[in-house]
Image (cartoon, coloured by chain):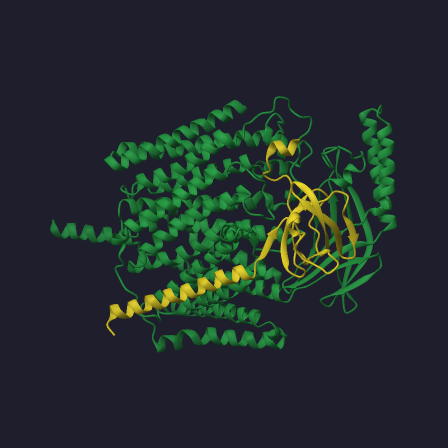
Amino acid sequence: MPTLGRALLILALAVAVYGTVAALVGGARGRRDLVVSARRAVYAMAALTAGAFALLEAAFLRTDLTFEVVADHSSTTTPTFYKATAIWSSQEGSLLLWLVLLGAWSSLVLFLTRRRMRDVQPYATAVLLGLGAFFAGLLVFSASPFATLPVAPAEGNGLNPLLRHPSMMSHPPMLYSGYTLFAIPFAFAVGALIVRRADAEWIAATRRFTLAAWFFLGVGILLGARWSYAELGWGGYWAWDPVENASLMPWLTGTALLHSVMLQERRGMLKIWNASLALACGVLAILGTFLVRSGILDSIHAFGASTLGVPFLVLIGLMIAGSVWLVVSRVDTLRSDARLDSLWSRESVFLANNLVLVGLCFVVFWGTFFPLIAEAATGTKQALGPPWFDRYTVPLTLLLVLLSGVGPVIAWRRGTLANARRSFVVPALTALVVIGVAVALGAAERPLALTMFACGAFVLGGVGQELVRGARARRAMSGDGVLRAVGALVARNRRRWGGYVVHVGMAVLFIGVAASSAFQKSQDVKLAPGQTTRVGGYDVTYEKATSRIDTQGGELERVVLGARVAVSRDGERVGTLEPERGYYPSRDERGLGAVGRFFEGESTSEVAMDAGLQRDLWTAVSPDFDRLKPIIDEGDAVFAKATGMPPAMRAQLLGQVLRGLSDRYVREGPPATFRVIVSPMVAWIWAGGLIVFGGGLLGLWPQGRTAPRPATARLRARVAQDLGRA
Amino acid sequence: MDPSRKRRVRLVVALAAAVVLASALIYTSFSSSSEARKPSQLRSAVNGQEYQLTGRVVPGSVRDIPGGKSFRVMDREGGPSIPVRYQGAIPDPFREGREVIIDVRRGTDGVFVGEKDTLVTKCPSKFEDEKQQRS
């Protein structure tokens, strides 16, 4: 099996290299057959790598410990769900997933565009295959997922307990889909620049892929935020951690690109800018992939040093140098067809939004790489914390949300005073009402949060106004019911309404971010059973200690110590929370006893939450098992002496001892340390995320036949012309 | 003003604004960053100045204190260690012998006091060099 897997990867590398060369030669000499062959090489690469992935996944599912990656990242006692996901907790498996997704998306885009842009396609194919060859090369030469062990160990390391979370199934594949999808606008931008195409066809052909990249990356980021929020010590939903930042950067440039392409499609403007943004997205996506693996920056994700740094740096260097050269040498062909008519127009709002997004990206880039920049400049490594990031990102984000409210309601080309009056009164009034309500509720002490509420309300008011006006006009024309009119309005222009829904979602999300970060109350406190603490108006009482032992497939998986916490407000019980901490046995048995092993290994906190639209109550517990230590030591001593005991009996006895310990913990109920956080409106972040998700789907959904497509219009014109000539 | 001149003025204004903003960014990043140091580089630390400390928790040095832990941190490669007192969330992977990153200031008693909630523990297994992990 491992040999077959290796063979598949070598074949994938071979077809990728062949295809790259075939596409380049085919493009340069105009040999269509070679270009078609190169496209088929993409399909072949996708199929071969998918086969390799399936082989590896099968090895994980049946826990074939002769595979080095399986032994390192899974075990027979790992629950099946996590066995399936353990594949991408490894460096090799995640690189393979990257390549599989790249192959799949590339095949899809090349298939869909196979009859279009025959000049651009060869080079786009070559770029996609070149990237594929790079990753296949890594998998063949330096990070083989099919490395085997001479002797299979009796048991594997198991999936790191910290990664045992349902998001492990969705968060990494979503991010990788986003990263790999950004290769597509990159590849087509390169192709269009090489052949000096100045029209927007490559943009139109890849727009849905850019949107999909933006969508998947966004969903991945949000799932990550949600996961991080539900863990102790990961800094809440966002911590400006380098790996988080790495995924945010291409997302920001992608957001900018999705907006600025509209100006090129409509007005033939910003061609250089769009090509540069598409190139930047591709480079940043690879940079993100690299950051996760290189260990050059200290991150909470903390990937150890790896040997892949140099090849990645070479690739990124090549991509940047090539991009800069292409753009600079094509500047003349990419002159704008039109000029900005007025600073007070939708075009200029788009431009401003782009500048803000790119500015944000630059801030994030600078802050993320500052340790390296500072070391190069001053010789000492320095780090920037969240306050520095906040100083710049908060005002920029405020501006961005405001612009996202102005953009949809301002006129194209040149806005007039009448237009402004018609469009801005309702959003501005909404914002004023929200300011009034928020001040009445006591938000005046945090002006930045208040400003965000106002900006968010402005967006909601604007989109609401557009919806009402559109539906009213539609009803006047067709006489449909309200819902039907809204449905028809949205269906007629999914792209536009998808965008508006995304704006609404982002506004809701940032209202949640502003409220939860500005008005959060948190406390760390040590409580004995029966004691109460007060956080943000809630009384939190440690009622009693809890404990249990989890087994998996007949084996002891972990010991869980926890607490039952009663929450009440003004004497009225609001809910009961049961935060826990699971202790997994250490795999490292040196110097650890049979019992002590369970308390010296990895442990994970299971946060307990009472979530609601108004506020989240978040609790985590750190149990103190000092009082159990004498018993643990005693147990260790007993087991150390009983070397001749048969394994079955030993396991049974161990179970009894652990159960005894667990019962004792509950009975004695030693004091435990709690972290209690009350944050308002966190649920708005996730709700906003869901709305964005819906808007993204709406935009991705194929447009029906209701709107005339430019291509068919052009075709009709040509047919008419031909008929007239005939 | 003729349109091309107007455009040029706009461009200059925009570029000037960008340069001003970028310099503000660069200036503040140097002034508000904390120096990343290893324990061996912190023996001559200035009291009250914030440093980002990176190092390994000395085995056997971790003690519970109200609301947090006290422990000693040494260089990754070993060597002399410095005392740290920290109050705030303790990340799950925190353990003796593990690598940590924490923002600290030296107090008058010579103990480095960690900023609340800045303690980050490197997770030991993910993507780590495989050989090292199994040994």
Residue B124 x, y percent position in the rendering: 65, 41
Residue A472 x, y percent position in the rendering: 41, 70
Residue toward you, A439 or A411:
A439
User: Is residue A670 visible to us here?
Assistant: yes
As drawn, A199 above or below A104: below
User: Is residue A114 visible to us here?
Assistant: no
Residue toward you, A648 or A711:
A648
B26 left or right of A413 in image: right
Q: Where the N terminus of chain A falls, by quadrant?
A: top right
Residue A668 x, y percent position in the rendering: 88, 50
Q: Residue B130 occupies which quadrant of the picture?
A: top right
B114 left or right of A712 in image: right
Chain with green colouring = A
A565 left or right of A152 in image: right
Chain with yellow colouring = B
Q: Residue A350 occupies which quadrant of the picture?
A: bottom left
As drawn, B4 above or below A45: below
Residue A30 x, y percent position in the rendering: 24, 36
